[in-house]
Image: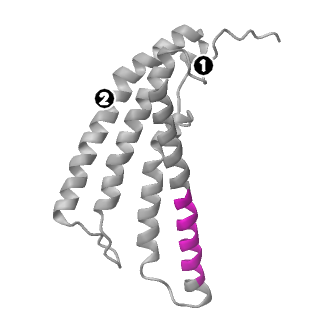
Amino acid sequence: MPIVRLIDGVNELVGRVVSVVALLFAVIIIYDVFMRYVLGQPTRWAFDVTKQLYGFYFIMLGGYALRHQSHVRVDLLTSRMGPTLRRWTEVVGYVIFFFPFAWIFARRSWDFAMTSWNQGELTYGAVQLPVYPLKMAMFVAAVLLLIQGVSEVLKLILNRAPHIPDSEVLDVR
């Protein structure tokens, strides 16, 4: 399944690269706290920069989280189903709920980013930062989430989903 490996690989790479951003905004926060409380010279830019970095970090990890089945799941019904029925129930769920949401998210975030780009939108904080890179990241994140959904559905259809066992597990307690 080369397409599945490609999609999973892209989201894995993005997830690992973006995780470094958490270190970056942690360092900036520590720097700001040190400047404010130790030296008595607060920064004007740290809050705005860390807010945008956190937004970027949070939004970009959606596809990575889906790849690792880390999104919140309410599997009250599917946990009681056999593997085959569970797989097909999840496929139907992706088709009915996930793909329409992901498509609308991608479409609307593209419009949102382009409006911001065309207006040269800036933040209104102490330091005026461009907003369009973060809004463009929303679009990229939506596309990554959408293609990861394709990968997950292919894994379900081909019976390669690691979170669903191939056969019934017997409870021998």
In the picture, the quarter occupied by the C terminus is top right
Within 10 Å of disc 1 (Cα), the crowding (few <14, some 14-19, many 20+) is some
Q: Amino acid at mark 1?
A: Ile
* Magenta residue span: 20-34
Q: Amino acid at mark 2?
A: Pro
The residue under the point 35% across, 58% down is 134
The residue under the point 41% across, 71% down is 48
| Viewer-closest of 14 and 31 | 14
Dot 2: what SS? helix
Q: Is residue 86 magenta?
A: no
Picture quadrant of residue 135: bottom left
Nearer the N terminus, badge 1 or badge 2? 2
Picture quadrant of residue 148: top left
The Cα–Cα distance between marks 1 and 2, rounded to whole angstroms, is 24 Å
The disc label shown at residue 138, or none: none
Left or right of residue 150, residue 26 in this image: right
Left or right of residue 17, residue 172 in this image: right
The answer to whether 95 is drawn above or below residue 41 in the figure is above
Dot 1: what SS? loop
Q: What residue did someone put label 1 on?
A: 164
